[in-house]
Amino acid sequence: LAASQHPVSMHQVMALGMRLFGRGHYGLVMPSVLAGTATVPLVYLLGRRLAGRSVGFVAAGLLAVGYTHIHFSRTLFGPIATLCLTLALLLLVTGLESGAPLAFALSGAALALGMFAYDSARIGPVLFAVLALWQALFDREGFKRSWRGWALLGGTAVVVFGPKIAFLVTDFQSFAGRGSEVAI
C-alpha cells in the first residue's frame, strides 16, 4: 500500500489545505498552522485536568509563545501529529477518570490518526504502553477498573491504523522510511 492509499494521509491533508487556502506555500502550511494553534487549548485542558487551572494556563501559555512550537507550526510536518497525540492523552485522562468507553475509543482513534500524520507520533503507542504498564504495576485497583478501556483504546487504534499495519508487515523498510536514517 502506498502512503497515499491510506484512509488519511499527509498528502490528502496538504491537498485539502491547498484547496481551501490557495495553491502556494500559504495553502500548503495552513493545516499545520491550524493544528499548532488548536494544540494550545488542548494543552490547557490537559494541564487543567491533570494539575489544575493554573497549570493549564501556564502550560498553554508556554506552548503558545514557545519558539519550537511556533517554528514547527509553520512547517508541513509535526503539528498535526502533536495535535493528535495531545488529544489522545486528553481523552485517555478523561477515560481513566470517568470510565467512559467512548473516551477510550476516541483516544485510540486519535493515537492512530497521529501516526498517519508524521513519524514523530510513533512515540504515542510506546508512551501509552508505558502508561498502561505503570498503572498495572503501581495502581492495580485503577487498572482493574480501567483494563477494558485500555483494551478498547488498543483495539480502536489497531482498527484505525489497520491499513498501515499491513504495510508495516509487508514492507517495514518503506514504513520506517527516513526515520531509520535519522533516528537514534
Image: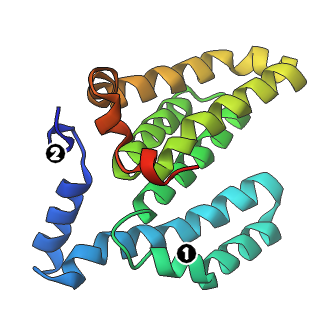
Crowd band around label 1 with a 10 angstrom C-alpha radius: few (<14), some (14–19), many (20+): some
Q: Position of residue 124 (x, y in %)?
A: 56, 42
Specify the quadrant that holds the N terminus. top left
Depth check: give the residue in front, 14 or 54.
Answer: 14
Q: Identify the disc placed on residue 4.
A: 2
Q: Label 1, on which residue?
A: 69
Q: Secondary structure at mark 2?
A: helix
Quick check: 183 above or below 55? above
Q: Residue at x 50, y 58 (%)?
A: 82
How many labels sit on residues? Answer: 2
132 displayed left or right of 10: right
Q: Nearer the viewer, residue 53 or 116?
A: 116
Outermost residue to the right: 138
The three-letter amino acid code for the residue at tag 1 is His
144 in relation to 128, above or below:
above
Task: Kindly state the secondary structure of the residue where label 1 is placed.
Answer: helix
Q: Nearer the viewer, residue 58 or 95?
A: 58
Q: Quadrant of residue 86?
A: bottom right
Q: Is residue 68 left or right of residue 109?
A: right
Q: Position of residue 143 (x, y in %)?
A: 77, 20
Name the spot of residue 106 as percent of width and height, x first. 47, 37
Mark 1 or mark 2, which is nearer the start of the sequence? Answer: 2
